[in-house]
Image (cartoon, rainbow, N blue to C red):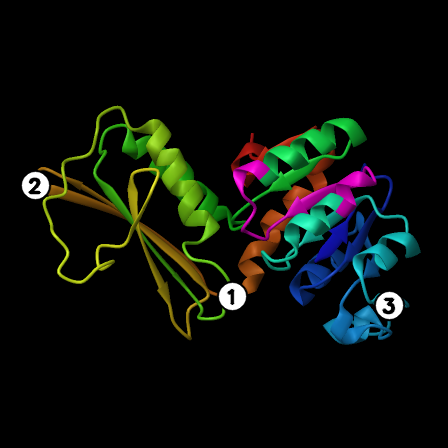
Amino acid sequence: TASAASSSPAKPTRFAAFSGSEVVRAVHAEKDMTVVAAVDPGHAGEDAGQVTGLGNLGITIAPDLETGLANAKVDVVVDFTNPSVIFENARKVVSKGVHMVIGTTGLTAEQREELSEMAAKTGSHILIAPNFCMGAVLLMKVSEEIARYMPDVEIIELHHNHKYDAPSGTAKLTAEKIARARQTAPAEDMTRESLPGVRGGKYEGVTIHSVRLPGYVAHQEVLFGGYGETLTLRHDSLNRQSFMPGVILAVRKVSDHPGLTYGLENYLE
């Protein structure tokens, strides 16, 4: 996980990082943000700067989230952990009225609703974004527009083989946007599977294919089919640095968006 805080340019932003060296390095490079805490059970007691290659920052990595939050004044928490712990992490942060930027997928609609209700009571602002890459966010926005006119569509998402979930949160959010935008039903799929699952899985009526292989980072294709034509959109994240501009944008803007927001595109206005 990682935590951060957003404030006016005149006041340095506090940032507590609870995982992800790229997040720590990106925030440390911003003049209006300051790393103030770090949490990582595997590196507890070490200096966060030494672990992330920034030199000595004087920030001792805490063994758990509660200790990290208690040791520093934190304004925003950025979480890039895993689906098994994200909900409890979010509950702990939101219960303290701290803003939160979540890049971990796996939260259910019911869990998002519970966090939204908690945020309304505590004053915490939450952004949940399946993808922080600007290109991926724009791909979703464009897919939503195209789906109004080309309802026949499938999604192929490709990730590294250590990704926890399938399909990806980005693919699911893309499918949700397409499902809402389609004005006519897609053509009937006449194919009959001789091998169960070979046609992928359905989510919100959209077929999604998940690929998990070494060498990939995060990639997605959205394929539209029409009469005598096809249209393909593709986005490729070539390294984890590609997520950082979106993370920085989210940290700066989360304090301006009350309640729970789902999708970074809502911060692009």
Crowdedness near tag 3: few (<14), some (14–19) or many (≥20) residues, C-alpha within 10 Å = some
Q: Can you say whether 132 is above or below 217 in the image?
A: above
Residue at far top of view:
183
Residue 248 seen in this snapshot: no
Residue carrying label 1: 239
- Residue at 15 percent of width and 56 percent of height: 193
Name which residue type carries label 2. Gly
Task: Check if mark 3's residue and mark 2's residue have beta carbons within 8 Å.
Answer: no
For this rendering, which residue is in front, 150 or 12? Answer: 150
First of labels 3, 1 by sequence position:
3
Q: Which residue is mark 3?
A: 57
Q: Which residue is the site of mark 2?
A: 228
Q: Amino acid at mark 3?
A: Leu
**Quick one: label 3 or label 2, which is nearer the N terminus?**
3
In magenta segment, residue 96: yes
Towards the viewer: 22 or 122: 122
